[in-house]
Image (cartoon, rainbow, N blue to C red):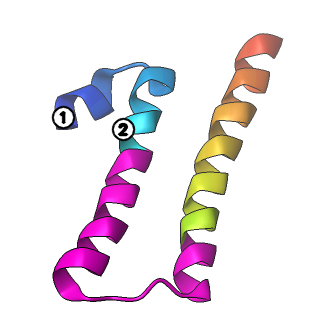
Amino acid sequence: MMKAMRKGEIATVAPFRYSRLLFGVLLGVVWFGETIDAQMLIGCGVIVGSGLFILWRGGKVRGNT
């Protein structure tokens, strides 16, 4: 998985990165009894939003060259 993250096409690998976030939250809720609160949702939103921004920005930069 780490080799795919380093060498793979970002559009192909990105969904797996976000699925790790989802599984991490699910594991924390089920295994450790954590609760989902506003801070957790905001943090997850920042992570996903920044990844989408990078994908969007990368496409614009590549398209101009």
Q: Name the residue under label 2.
A: 16
Stretch in magenta: 18-43
28 and 63: which is toward the camera: 28
- Examine the residues drawn in magenta and state their main secondary structure: helix
Q: Where is residue 37 in the image (x, y as percent from the top left)?
A: 54, 88
User: Dot 1: within a 10 Å radius of its alpha carbon, few (fewer than 14), some, or many (20 or more) residues?
Assistant: few
Distance of label 1 from label 2 (alpha carbons): 9 Å
Q: In the shown orientation, is residue 2 left or right of residue 26?
A: left
> Element under label 1?
loop
- Numbered mark located on residue 1 in the image: 1
> Element under label 2?
helix
Please indicate, yes or no, whether residue 51 appears anywhere in the rendered image. Answer: yes
- Quarter of the rendering containing residue 17: top left
Query: Which amino acid lies under the numbered mark 2 shown in the image of this protein?
Result: Phe
Seen in the picture, residue 7 relative to 17 is either above or below; the reply is above
50 drawn magenta: no
In this rendering, the label closer to the viewer, 1 or 2: 2
Q: Where is residue 3 in the image (x, y as percent from the top left)?
A: 19, 29
Please indicate, yes or no, whether residue 65 appears anywhere in the rendered image. Answer: no
Q: Do the residues labelled 1 and 2 touch (CB within 8 Å)?
A: yes
Seen in the picture, residue 46 relative to 39 is either above or below; the reply is above
Query: Which amino acid lies under the numbered mark 1 shown in the image of this protein?
Result: Met
User: Dot 2: within a 10 Å radius of its alpha carbon, few (fewer than 14), some, or many (20 or more) residues?
Assistant: some
